Structure formats: structure tokens, C-alpha cells
Amino acid sequence: MGRRRRKVVKVRRRKLPELFLCPRCGKNTVKGTIDKKRNRAVVICSNCSLNGIFPAKPQMSEVDAYCLFTDSYYEGKLQEEVAVE
Ligand SMILES: [Zn+2]
């Protein structure tokens, strides 16, 4: 009964910005940001600079923005050049 229980160490997760897979370069470097003030969602790949800006909907999350981003990419709607610095 005198067993010592191992203390469970909880790993604290730091809240990092979520990164997604880029449909063009295939790296996990796509970041989605919801700009609530300007009512838009900005998604950009920090590796190849592929980016898209979308009108933000209420309750929109970064993941939703990323989905729009990939859809637009496959539809050929995304710009090749950097529009967001
Ligand atoms: Zn990329």
C-alpha cells in the first residue's frame, strides 16, 4: 500500500498560433488570422508567401479561413504574389 504514485505532470500547452499545411509548398507554415475589426480573414503561408484574404463571417475560425484558402487555391483564385506584408 505504500506505493508511491507517480506524479502526473501536466504538460502546459502554450497557445501558439495554429499552423496549417500549405496546399502549394506542402509545409506546415500556413497561418490564419481573423481580423475582426476589418471583418476579414487573412491566411498566409510563411514559406512560399501564398496568401488569401476573405470576408470574415460571424463566428468564423482560423480553420474556416484555412478551408477557404485551400478551396480558393485549388480553384486557382489565389494570387501568387504577396499582398500582405
Ligand atoms: Zn506555402
Image: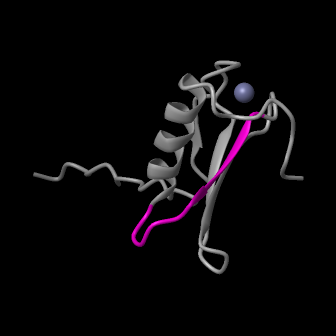
Residue name at image x 52 percent, y 50 percent: 65
Using residue 17 as the reference point, say whether residue 66 is left or right of it: left
Q: Quadrant of residue 78?
A: top right
Q: Nearer the viewer, residue 49 or 29?
A: 49
Residue name at image x 75 percent, y 34 percent: 50
Looking at the picture, how far across and down is residue 31, in whole percent?
65, 46
Residue name at image x 60 percent, y 23 percent: 23
Q: Considering only vertical position in the picture, is 19 above or below 4? A: above
Q: Nearer the viewer, residue 26 or 64?
A: 64
Looking at the picture, how far across and down is residue 34, in whole percent?
59, 64
Q: Quadrant of residue 22?
A: top right
Ligand 1 sits in quadrant: top right
Q: Quadrant of residue 38?
A: bottom right
Using residue 81 as the reference point, say whether residue 35 is left or right of it: left
Looking at the picture, how far across and down is residue 60, in whole percent?
43, 63
Residue name at image x 85 percent, y 47 percent: 83
Residue 78 in the magenta stretch? The answer is no
Residue 53 in the magenta stretch? The answer is yes
Looking at the picture, how far across and down is residue 14, in whole percent?
58, 59
The stretch of residues the image draws in magenta is 50-60
Number of numbered callouts drawn? 0
Colouring mode (rainbow / by chain / secondary structure / one colour): one colour
Using residue 46 as the reference point, say whether residue 73 is left or right of it: left
On the question of residue 16 being in view, the answer is no
